[in-house]
Image: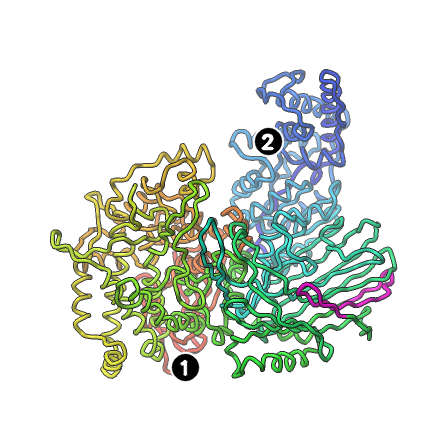
C-alpha cells in the first residue's frame, strides 16, 4: 500500500474546517451589496447571489479575484480588474475581492472557525501509517483560519493563495496547487491522494493524475463530484476508513484502470465518445452510440463497419464527376427504442437526465450505459443498456436492454430494429458527396427471426443481418406475441407489455452478420442465409454468449497488456490504445482480406483507407501476435499486381503502391480537389508520397527479423521487396554533372511541401527521408536476397524475371544517392529547402493560438507553405524513428557522406527542425518522443511528447478529428515507445538488449512479449530488471544484454539485473 500511496493533500474550506460557511456568508454580503448598487445605477434587475447555484459554480475553490470575475461574468457584468492594492470600496475586480476578504476576517474574529473532527481523526490515522500530509487551498487566509482553529502545526506543507501568487500558480481546476504541495512533500502526484469538496477541486485532482480523489459532499451533490473526477464520494470523512483506502490501492485503482467512464452526458462530446467506446473484433465494429439513437447530425452516429467493405460512388462537384471509394456505413443492428403509454417513441438522452454513466469495459470488451431519466410527464425510468461484438465468434453481436419504471405503471412498447436506411454522413467535409451506398434487397421474418438483406450498390457485396429476441420480467422469460413492420428500408419487431412500477424488464437481442465476401467458410452467395440462420439458431443465452466473449478478451489481455504502477492516466490510456488496435485487427484477420486502416474501423475519416500508418501499427502486433502482422502484410501481397500495374501505367518498373489503398489496390487518392476559395480544381499532390512503398518493404523486413518466418519471406516477402526496389531504381535519375543519383518530383512525410514556390509541377526533389530510406531499403533488400538459398533465387528469376545485374545497379545507387547536407551539419529536408524563407512563428501563435495546420492558415491569408521552412510533422527527423544514429551514420557512409559524431549530428538536426515543425499530425508527437531516447539529456522532453501523444485521441487534441475515427498509427506508435524507449528493448536475431528509462514517477512496468516464437516476461522498476523466459525449451538459451554485460537466459530460469 505505502509503495503506491505516500501522501495525502487536503483542501481547507469545507474539508478541514467549516470556514466555507463564513466564505459563503462573506461572498453573499459582498455580491448582494454590489449588485444592489449596480442595479440602481444602471436601471437593471439582477438576481442576488445564490448559495446553491452561484457559490459552487463560480467561486468555490477558486482564487478570490478569479471568483469575482467568474461570478460577475455570469451576470454579464464587466468591470476593470484593478490592482490588488485597491480599497474595498473601489468597483474593480480586486476591490470587490478585497471587500469580501475584509468581511471574512471580521466573521472569523466574531464567530471563530469550526473544525471537522472526522477530518482531524483521519489525518491522525494517516500519519500513523506514515503518510505525509499537506494542505492545498486557494485561500489567502489559511494562516488566519488555521491559527484560529488551533491547527497551525497539523500539516507538513501548506500551499495557499499567498504561495500561489508568489509562484504564479494557476487556480483550480488546474492542478498546480496540489501538484506543488505533492512536490513539497517530496512526492509525485501519482503517490498522493487528495480530499476536496469543490467541483473545481476534484477536477484538479483528476487533471493532476492523483492516485485517489476523494470528494466530500457536504454542500455539493455527490453525483456532481463523481462526474467531475472524484473516485470515492462521502458526505463526511467519518464514512471513510483506512481499510477502504487500502482496498482502493489494492483493488479499486486497478479495476478502474480497465474502464473509460463518462458520468455526465454531453451532446457536444458524444461523437468523440462514440469513437472511443467502439466495440469490435477485427471483422466488424460498431461505434459506441447509445442503442436508442439514430443518426443525428453532429450528435449521434451509430455507425457499423465491416473490415475491407468499400463502395465506389460518383459525385457531381462543380460540373465535374469525381469518384470516391468509401468504407461503407452498414445497417444499424443496435437500435432498440421505447414508447411509454400513448406517447411516441423517444430517445431517453433527450429527456431530463437525473443520473448517467457511459462505460467502456476494456477488459471484457463491453460498452454499457446507465441512465435515470425523467420524461415530459414526470415519469422516472432507470435504464441500463449493454452491448458487445463477440471476440469468440466473429459474426455475432448482442444487446441487453433493461429498464425499470420507478414511479409509474404503464403500457410500454419496445421496438427493436435493423436499419438499412443508413448513409455515410459521419465526416462533415464529405457530406456534399454521394453517400447512399446500400440498397435493401429483402427484409422479412422467418422462424422467429427478423433479417435485413442488403448489398452495396456498386461493389455488389451482399450483407445479411439477422436478429432474434428474448424478453424477461425480472428473471422470468415472457412469452409475448410480437409484431413486425417493414418500412423505409427498416425492419422492426415490436413487443408490447404492461409494465409495473418497480419491475425490471429485459430485452436480449442476438445478432448475426455475414457477407458474400467472407473468407472463413467455403460457400457461394446463396449459402449466406443457411449459415446465418444456422448460427443464430444456436444463440439462446445472452450470459453464455457474454461469458465466451469475456474469456476470449481476457485471453488476449494475458499476452497484450502493459501493466503500469504509479501512473493512473498512462495505464488507462495505454490500455485504451491497445484495446482499439485489437478491435481493428486480431486473430480473425486470417479470414479477412484487408490491411490496417489509418483510422481503425471506427468511423469514416480518410474513407477507411490504408496508408503508411501500418509502419506505426505493426510493432504492436510484432511483439504480441506476429501472425496478425503477417495477415495484414498479405493484404499488400494480394495487391502486388495492382502495384505493378500502377508503376507501368506511370512509366516505371517494379511495384509502386498507392498512397491510399482500399479493396482493389488501386490509387484512391483524388487526382483533383476543389478549392472553394479560388473556385478552381487543384491537383491533389499527396499521391506523390512514394515513400509508402518504402514503409511496406520496411514492414516486411522487420516482420521477418522478429519471426524468422522463412515461408513468408520465400513465398511473398522477398518478391515484394525486390519489386519495390525495382520501382525506386526506375524513378532514380543519374546526373552526370555531380556524379550522383537523384529522386525528383516526390513528397516526403511533410505534407506542407507539395511543390516548390510558384511551381506548376508538383513534387520536390531529393527529399532526404525518401532518399536515405531508399538507400537503406535497397541495402537490406540486397542483404535479404543474398541470404536466400539458391533454389529460392532461381525460383524468383523464373517468376519475376529477376537478374543478378539488378543487384549491382542497386549497390551503385546506394553508393551515389544524393542527400543535401549543409556545412553546419544539417540535413536539408529536400533540395532547395535552405533557400526558403523563415516563418515568423510567434506572429502566428499570437494571432491564431493553435497553428498545427499552418498550411490552412497560410492559404487562407493568400500565402503558401511552399514558401517557408516549416513542416507539418517530422520529415528529416522521421529517419531517426527507423534508424538509430549509428545506423544512419552507416548508411550515409555507404552513400559517400561522413558526418562525424552521430549523436552530435542528431542533436544539431533535432534542434534545427523542432523549431520549424507545427505538429499538425498526431504522428508528430510519437516520432519526436521516440527519437529522443538517443539524446540522454532530453528525457523530460521525451516524456512530454509521449504524454501529448497519449492524450491526443482521448481529449481530441486535433480539434474534432477523433470523432470521425481513432488514429491507429498514433496508438501503435505510442505503445511502441513504451517497449523501445521506456523499457529500452532492442531486438536482434537471437538476443535482445535492454536498457530501461522509466518515467520518473512510474513505480513498475510489467509486460510479456514474443521474439522469434519465444515468450518473455519483463518486470522493470526504477532500480531492477527481472526477465523470465516463458516458453524456452530444454537446451534453448537467449542472450540478454544490459550495458556492457551479457546474460544467458535458459528454460525455467530468470535474469535479475540492478540498474542505475
Q: Is residue 486 magenta?
A: yes
For the point 76% across and 32% down, the residue is 50
Between 552 and 740, the one lying in front of the other is: 740
Residue 647 in view, yes or no: yes
**Nearest to the observer: residue 382 or residue 170:** 382
Q: Which residue is mark 1?
A: 1033
> Relative to the observer, which residue lies in front, 632 or 427?
427
Question: Mark 2 sits on what residue?
Answer: 161
Does the image show residue 250? no
Give the extent of the magenta segment. Answer: 484-506
Q: Is residue 772 above or below residue 779?
A: above
Q: Secondary structure at mark 2?
A: helix
Label 1 Cα neighbours within 10 Å, binned few <14 / some 14-19 / many ≥20? few
**Residue 1043: x %, y % from top left:** 32, 61
Helix, strand or loop for disc 1: loop
Image quarter of the N terminus:
bottom right
Q: Nearer the viewer, residue 35 or 421?
A: 421
Q: Residue at 31% x, 67% y: name it.
A: 655
Where does the image place residue 614, in percent across and percent down from the top left? 41, 63
N-terminal of the pair, mark 1 or mark 2, is: 2
Q: CA distance from mark 1 to mark 2?
A: 63 Å
Instruction: Bin the neighbour count of mark 2 within 10 Å (Cα to Cα): few under 14, some 14-19, many 20 and up.
Output: many
With 99 as the anchor, is 653 left or right in this view? left
Amino acid at each position: 500500500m505505502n509503495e503506491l500511496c505516500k501522501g495525502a493533500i487536503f483542501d481547507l474550506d469545507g474539508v478541514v474546517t467549516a470556514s466555507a460557511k463564513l466564505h459563503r456568508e462573506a461572498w453573499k454580503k459582498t455580491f448582494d451589496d454590489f449588485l444592489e448598487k449596480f442595479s440602481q445605477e444602471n436601471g437593471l434587475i439582477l438576481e442576488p447571489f445564490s448559495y446553491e447555484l452561484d457559490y459552487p459554480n463560480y467561486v468555490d475553490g477558486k482564487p478570490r479575484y478569479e471568483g469575482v470575475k467568474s461570478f460577475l461574468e455570469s451576470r454579464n457584468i464587466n468591470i476593470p480588474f484593478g490592482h490588488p492594492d485597491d480599497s474595498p470600496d473601489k468597483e474593480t475586480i480586486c476591490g470587490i475581492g478585497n471587500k469580501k476578504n475584509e468581511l471574512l476576517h471580521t466573521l472569523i474574529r466574531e464567530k471563530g472557525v469550526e473544525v471537522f473532527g472526522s477530518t482531524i481523526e483521519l489525518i491522525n490515522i494517516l500519519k500513523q501509517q506514515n503518510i505525509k500530509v499537506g494542505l492545498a487551498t486557494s485561500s489567502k487566509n489559511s494562516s488566519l483560519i488555521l491559527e484560529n482553529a488551533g491547527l497551525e502545526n497539523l500539516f507538513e506543507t501548506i500551499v495557499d493563495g499567498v504561495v500561489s501568487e508568489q509562484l504564479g500558480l494557476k487556480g483550480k481546476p488546474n492542478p498546480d496547487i496540489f501538484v506543488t504541495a505533492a512536490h513539497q512533500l517530496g512526492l509525485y502526484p501519482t503517490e498522493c491522494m487528495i480530499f476536496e469538496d469543490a467541483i473545481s477541486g476534484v477536477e484538479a485532482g483528476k487533471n493532476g493524475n492523483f492516485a485517489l480523489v476523494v470528494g466530500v459532499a457536504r454542500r455539493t451533490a455527490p453525483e456532481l463530484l463523481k462526474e467531475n473526477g472524484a473516485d470515492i464520494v462521502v458526505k463526511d470523512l467519518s464514512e471513510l476508513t483506512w481499510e477502504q483506502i487500502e482496498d482502493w490501492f489494492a483493488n479499486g485503482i486497478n479495476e478502474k484502470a480497465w474502464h473509460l467512464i463518462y458520468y455526465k452526458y454531453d451532446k457536444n462530446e458524444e461523437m468523440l465518445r462514440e469513437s472511443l467506446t467502439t466495440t469490435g473484433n477485427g471483422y466488424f465494429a460498431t461505434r459506441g452510440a447509445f442503442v436508442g439513437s439514430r443518426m443525428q447530425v453532429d450528435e449521434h452516429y451509430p455507425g457499423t463497419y465491416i473490415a475491407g467493405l468499400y463502395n465506389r460512388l460518383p459525385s457531381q462537384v462543380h460540373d465535374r464527376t469525381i469518384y470516391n471509394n468509401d468504407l461503407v456505413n452498414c445497417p444499424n443492428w443496435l437500435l432498440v427504442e421505447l414508447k411509454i403509454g400513448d406517447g411516441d417513441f423517444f430517445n431517453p438522452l433527450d429527456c431530463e437526465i437525473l443520473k448517467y454513466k457511459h462505460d467502456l469495459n476494456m477488459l471484457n470488451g463491453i460498452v454499457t450505459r446507465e441512465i435515470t431519466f425523467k420524461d415530459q410527464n414526470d415519469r422516472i425510468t432507470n435504464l441500463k443498456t449493454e452491448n458487445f461484438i463477440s471476440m469468440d465468434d466473429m459474426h455475432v453481436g448482442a444487446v441487453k436492454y433493461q429498464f425499470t419504471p420507478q414511479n409509474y405503471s404503464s403500457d410500454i412498447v419496445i421496438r427493436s430494429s435493423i436499419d438499412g436506411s443508413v448513409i455515410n454522413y459521419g465526416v462533415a467535409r464529405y457530406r456534399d458527396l454521394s453517400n447512399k451506398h446500400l440498397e435493401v434487397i429483402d427484409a422479412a421474418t422467418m422462424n422467429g427471426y427478423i433479417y435485413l438483406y442488403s448489398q452495396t450498390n456498386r461493389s455488389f457485396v451482399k450483407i445479411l443481418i439477422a436478429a432474434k429476441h428474448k424478453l424477461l420480467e425480472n428473471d422470468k422469460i415472457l412469452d409475448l406475441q410480437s409484431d413486425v413492420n417493414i418500412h423505409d428500408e427498416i425492419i422492426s419487431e415490436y413487443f408490447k407489455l404492461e409494465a409495473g412500477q418497480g419491475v425490471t424488464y429485459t430485452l436480449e437481442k442476438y445478432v448475426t452478420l455475414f457477407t458474400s465476401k467472407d473468407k472463413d467458410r467455403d460457400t457461394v452467395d446463396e449459402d449466406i442465409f443457411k449459415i446465418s440462420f444456422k448460427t443464430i439458431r444456436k444463440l439462446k443465452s445472452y450470459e453464455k454468449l457474454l461469458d465466451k466473449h469475456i474469456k476470449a478478451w481476457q485471453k488476449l489481455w494475458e499476452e497484450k497488456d502493459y501493466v503500469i504502477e504509479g501512473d493512473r492516466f498512462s495505464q488507462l490510456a495505454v490500455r485504451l490504445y491497445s484495446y482499439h488496435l485489437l478491435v481493428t485487427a486480431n486473430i480473425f484477420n486470417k479470414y479477412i482480406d484487408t490491411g490496417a486502416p489509418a483510422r481503425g474501423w471506427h468511423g469514416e475519416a480518410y474513407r477507411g483507407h490504408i496508408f503508411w500508418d501500418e509502419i506505426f501499427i505493426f510493432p504492436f502486433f510484432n511483439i504480441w501476435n506476429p501472425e496478425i502482422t503477417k495477415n495484414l502484410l498479405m493484404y499488400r501481397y494480394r495487391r502486388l499486381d495492382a502495384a505493378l500495374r500502377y508503376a507501368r501505367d506511370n512509366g516505371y518498373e517494379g511495384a509502386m503502391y498507392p498512397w491510399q489503398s482500399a479493396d482493389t489496390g488501386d490509387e484512391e487518392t483524388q487526382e483533383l480537389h476543389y478549392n472553394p476559395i479560388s473556385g478552381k480544381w487543384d491537383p491533389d499532390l499527396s499521391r506523390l508520397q512514394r515513400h509508402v512503398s518504402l514503409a511496406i518493404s520496411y514492414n516486411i523486413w522487420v516482420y521477418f527479423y522478429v519471426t524468422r518466418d522463412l515461408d513468408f519471406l520465400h513465398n511473398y516477402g522477398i518478391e515484394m521487396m525486390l519489386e519495390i526496389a525495382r520501382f525506386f531504381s526506375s524513378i532514380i535519375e543519374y546526373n552526370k554533372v555531380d556524379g550522383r543519383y537523384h529522386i525528383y518530383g516526390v513528397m516526403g512525410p511533410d505534407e506542407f511541401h507539395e511543390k516548390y514556390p510558384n511551381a506548376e509541377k508538383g513534387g520536390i526533389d531529393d527529399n532526404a527521408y525518401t532518399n536515405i530510406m531508399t538507400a537503406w531499403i535497397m541495402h537490406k533488400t540486397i542483404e535479404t536476397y543474398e541470404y536466400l538459398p539458391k533454389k529460392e533465387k532461381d525460383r524468383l528469376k523464373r517468376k519475376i524475371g529477376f537478374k543478378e545485374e539488378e543487384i549491382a545497379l542497386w549497390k551503385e545507387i546506394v553508393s551515389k544517392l544524393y542527400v543535401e547536407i549543409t556545412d553546419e551539419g544539417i540535413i536539408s529536408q529536400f533540395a532547395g529547402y535552405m533557400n526558403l524563407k523563415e516563418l515568423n512563428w510567434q506572429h502566428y501563435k499570437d494571432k491564431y493560438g493553435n497553428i498545427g495546420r499552418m498550411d490552412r492558415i497560410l492559404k487562407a491569408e493568400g500565402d503558401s507553405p511552399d514558401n517557408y521552412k516549416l513542416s507539418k510533422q517530422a520529415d528529416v527527423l522521421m529517419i531517426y524513428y527507423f534508424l538509430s544514429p549509428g545506423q544512419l551514420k552507416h548508411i550515409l557512409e555507404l552513400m559517400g557522406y561522413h558526418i562525424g559524431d552521430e549523436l552530435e549530428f542528431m542533436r544539431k538536426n533535432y534542434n534545427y527542425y523542432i523549431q520549424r515543425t507545427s505538429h499538425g499530425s498526431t504522428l508528430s508527437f510519437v516520432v519526436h518522443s521516440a527519437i529522443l531516447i538517443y539524446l540522454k539529456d532530453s528525457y523530460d522532453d521525451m516524456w512530454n511528447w509521449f504524454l501529448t501523444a497519449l492524450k491526443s485521441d482521448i481529449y481530441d487534441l486535433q480539434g474534432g478529428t477523433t470523432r470521425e475515427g481513432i488514429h491507429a498509427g498514433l496508438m501503435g506508435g505510442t505503445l511502441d515507445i513504451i517497449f523501445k524507449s521506456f523499457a529500452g528493448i532492442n531486438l536482434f536475431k537471437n538476443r535482445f538488449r535492454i536498457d530501461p528509462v522509466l518515467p520518473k514517477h512510474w513505480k513498475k512496468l510489467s509486460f510479456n512479449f514474443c521474439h522469434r516464437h519465444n515468450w518473455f516476461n519483463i518486470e522493470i522498476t526504477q532500480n531492477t530488471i527481472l526477465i523470465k523466459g516463458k516458453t524456452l525449451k530444454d537446451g534453448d538459451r537467449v542472450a540478454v544484454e544490459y550495458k556492457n554485460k551479457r546474460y544467458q537466459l535458459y528454460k525455467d530460469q530468470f535474469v535479475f539485473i540492478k540498474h542505475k
